[in-house]
Amino acid sequence: MTAAPLVRLAGVDKRFGAVRALAGVDLSVDTGACLGLVGHNGAGKSTLMAILAGVLAADHGEMHVAGQDVTHGHAVTQAHRLGLRCVFQELSLCPNLTVAENTRVLHRALDGWGWRRRAAALIRDRLDTIFPGHGIDPDDVTGDLSIGRRQMVEIARAFTVTDTPVRLVILDEPTSSLDAVVAGHLLAFVRRFVADGGSVILISHLLGEVLDTADRIVVMRDGRVVADRLATAFDRGRLVEAMGSVADDDVDGAAAAAAATPATGDRSMGGTPVVRAHPAGAGIGGLTLEAWQGEIVGLAGLGGHGQTAMLVRLFEAARHPGVVNAGAMVRLPAAFVAGDRQSDGVFPLWSIARNISIRSLSQLLWRGLIVRRAETELAETWRTRIGIRTPSVDHPILSLSGGNQQKALFARALASDAGVLLMDDPMRGVDVGTKQEVYGMLRAEAAKGRTIIWYTTEMDELKHCDHVYVFRAGAIVADLTRAAMTEDAVLHASFEARAA
Amino acid sequence: MTGSRPASALGRLALQPWLWAWLGALAVWLATIAFTRGQGAGEVLTAAFTFGTFFVIVAIGQMFVVTLGPGNVDLSIPATMTLAGTVAMKLMDGDNGMLAVGLLAALGCGLAVGVFNYGLIRLLAIPPIIATLSSSFLVQSTAIWTNRGLRIKPPSALADFATAKLGGLPALALCVIALAGVMHIVLTRTPYGRAVIAVGQNPRAARFAGVDVDRTRFVTYVQAALFAALCGFCLAGFSGGAALNMGEEYLLSSIAVVVIGGTSVAGGFANVPGLWGAALFLFLLVTMLNTFGLGAGIRLILTGLIIIAVIVIAGSSSRKREG
Amino acid sequence: MSALARLAPPRLLRALLPAVSLAAILAAIFWLQPRTASYFGLNLLLNLSIPIALATIAQMFILCVNDLDLSIGGYVSLTACITATWLNDTPALGVLALLLCVVAYAAMGALIHLRQLPSIVVTLGMSFVWLGLAVLLLPTPGGQAPDWLRALMTLKPPYVPFPIVAAVVFALVVHVGLMRSAYGVVLRGAGGNPRAVERAGWSLLHVKLTLYALAGLFGVLAGMALVGLTTSADANIALRYTLLSIAGVILGGGEFVGGRVSPIGAVMGAMTLTLAGSFLSFLRLNPDWQIGAQGAILILVLALRALINRAERRAP
């Protein structure tokens, strides 16, 4: 086909603070084609799609949709008018409305007498077409449906047509809550939709379904497009290879340093672990997580597969050290280092010092009162030790850059009496320099006898770990020692081959 | 509330959230005595401290509750005041020897209401507003039932104390100033105070920072009910007995004093001095408008508009996260 | 509880709860005092529920977008005072004043939305303003209900007492408007998932303006109905409605967040609260416990709902 592509993006840039989420991305989607988009967490796929859908604005770059230049002033309503529809990972249905009513929210044209009947017919028709035997009634309240069915409604709703055509549907992890049969229905429908002249962008971590469904596959890494080829030019192995990062000398050096300082409580020595827990969602199958004193244990796998849930369970269990609580036991007090700083970590109205001291107030008391000077001293100590770049620890926490806020959260945990550090992908959006500093500190803390449980989505960080557990669908599917830990091993354990 | 901080002492003072309430109180007082050409300046101030005392007592508890974050308001304060005042007066029956028993009974009422409130919040998993609203109905009824329309005089010692003056200032006001000082220290210098502020800013982060969120909330609701009970006890002593409607005006006023005093309704940001400023301001405003010969209607309208103005200004000067 | 959950889906149970509580309290009253089960008995029992139901509907519109209105009591007092004075003496001025009240309510909604202010504080401030205006208008109890309004409120329709007719009419009208109409869906959606509604291209400002204006309108109706019943007004006449209306919405199955409200339930909740007040006098119990009974019923229903929710969570 030589016709102009339906969507053409050129040189799209997007920054979030210090982090460059997209670095000059070019992308085009042809009419009547399915484009597969793959990449590891944080590669920039979701950001790119949000820009295309008009939810986010790009910092730089050109955008053309259906022959129109939409570089400036692209917004959700316009995207809808041009025939762009989005199925995002977070559900965008109103849980208090019925399925038919949610269809109405998307379509202004569903108005006047009998709108309810028309909306119900519209969504039922799409559901029947895409998911035969779906078992969803248009009058069902969305919030009462299972998550899988909600996702089906969301997908079907994106394909409904009233007064504007549907030209391109973006499916971001559409099958994450669907079982294999239903997912198969969806992918078959995508092929039919494409054959009828529609376009689809399919984002999925299930490489098999991308390989089978897409005409062309784009691989993203670190905010760039690193491969853009016909689907037939790829196979599983080559996709995984394209997604992985190139070897980084610098990191290898750091890892070597890590290897040189062995864990103080070696597993081979026997004894009892400091942390022991079985994933809650895994039933009796899968492996059990164990960590010994002085170990750095990595939790790997794709985002949202049970790693954070495990950390939260360990945190709750650590409230009563040594007691087995719902299958989890932690022998020492724990401190939590949040990755989602704004929602889980930072107290936005407080100074840096107060943000650091909150976990250690009991050490700062004199006759039941907090001693201000001791509090400032504690914060100052950690400011210099961890290198928080600020003129004074009395400044508001929000005056710090993201990376320095994260350092303050590390300081909060390290300053505490905790013997176990639980880290929830804490390096998100942190610059490289800061990362290297923190890695060094973590190794030092482990050497002093602290146990670190570290969930990370970055392959490089796993190289600092003595042990890596790979999570998939809420269970631990692989237990890799440092020697066995390779990027390939982790990726293969994380990406399930549905076809197999 | 961003990076740079004014270095001068004056600049730091201007940043204090309680300053505006005090400045407002001062301005209103000056306007009043300017109108009367200085007559009765002292009496006005004494009256303001006398009546402001009762608002401050309940507002301290309400402030801790509001600081817990969006949705946290104690609507049972008026009912608790009435119940505590009634039960205490009835028990003491004018006998000075029963003073301690009466006070303990009042505080016991507060303790019971607070525990009940928090029980509802936890067991029924309902928003605190609904829980305290429901319990206020029950508590109010209990108070009516206990009271039976009788007005029992307080013991003479209590009445004397509640109306006594020390060097021009009401003795009770001095006690409550000291109490406010203690609560200021509790808020700023104890782990409990820090926990309240942390929960109000971000309950998830507070939990992950090791704060016992449930216990913090429990203590706060019990404390608010205890202060309401104390206020009911003192007010009944002051006004010659417990009346069934004695708590009525404290429902909205306790929230108003907290807001005007510079505490954030979005939670996580509170201060005690502002409570005194706001209570004095509200009373002096009424006095001023009375002096000007304006009626209750204008007074109420101005009070309302000032509350809204305060929240609009506070909302725009520091963009807080939404509830 | 899980056996119960198998017998009836929790959602159905929850939806039936307001009707069941209303029926239960009515049955109890009939049983205690069979004479109330008559045209006049019901008229007497339910008369005062009309203004409360209207105020409850007003509160429901506000709760629909996760806000809370602490000013509805003062507002109903004000509209009652306007009805008993201006609307009676100079009808044109009265109508204009009431219209202005509705506009002011909508403006309050716009202020809350545009400045992202906590609704609790803004409505708290406005409650003083409404009350102040009412005091200015009617410093001492007095005024008089317009004759046509009195006639309307004492209407004796055949077979069914007026309060029941009124309740059914209001409940159905609001049900159609909010629960069945196309724009009503958007209004409720804005309570359930505001971001999704905005992403679909709807104006949240428009949503809030509409809901606050509707609340203002029903507040006006509540004030008029109240004056029609009491024939005169005073500035404090409806202050209790603030708390009663919140309780009514919650009793009627409404929830504090998430746009889950029900107009029919709200009307039933208001009636249940009114009846709870009279229930005690039939028990020959001390009338002191009237308010307490309202609180007890509220807690009881909330406890039942908590049990249903717990059963729901246990059953996958």
Image: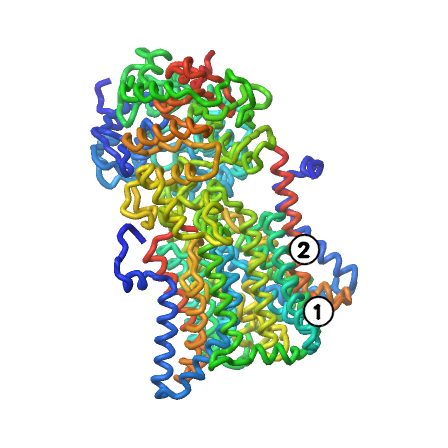
Front residue of B132/A34: it is B132
Q: Position of residue B179 (x, y in %)?
A: 51, 66
Front residue of A316/B143: it is A316
Residue A139 visible here = yes
Residue A82 bears which disc, if any? none
Compared with residue B298, is residue A311 higher up or lower down, i.e. above or below?
above
Q: Residues within 10 Å of mark 2 (few under 14, many from 20)?
A: many
Is residue A11 left or right of A51 when viewed as pictured? left
Q: Which amino acid type corresponds to the residue marked 1 in the rendered image?
A: Trp
Identify the residue shown where x is 57% and y is 29%: A328
Q: Position of residue A55 (x, y in %)?
A: 32, 38
Identify the residue shown where x is 58% and y is 36%: A320
Label 1 belongs to which residue? B145
Compared with residue A285, is residue C23 higher up or lower down, i.e. above or below?
below
Q: Chain of mark 2?
A: C
Q: Chain of mark 1?
A: B
Q: Which amino acid type corresponds to the residue marked 2 in the rendered image?
A: Leu
Is residue C21 left or right of C132 when viewed as pictured? right
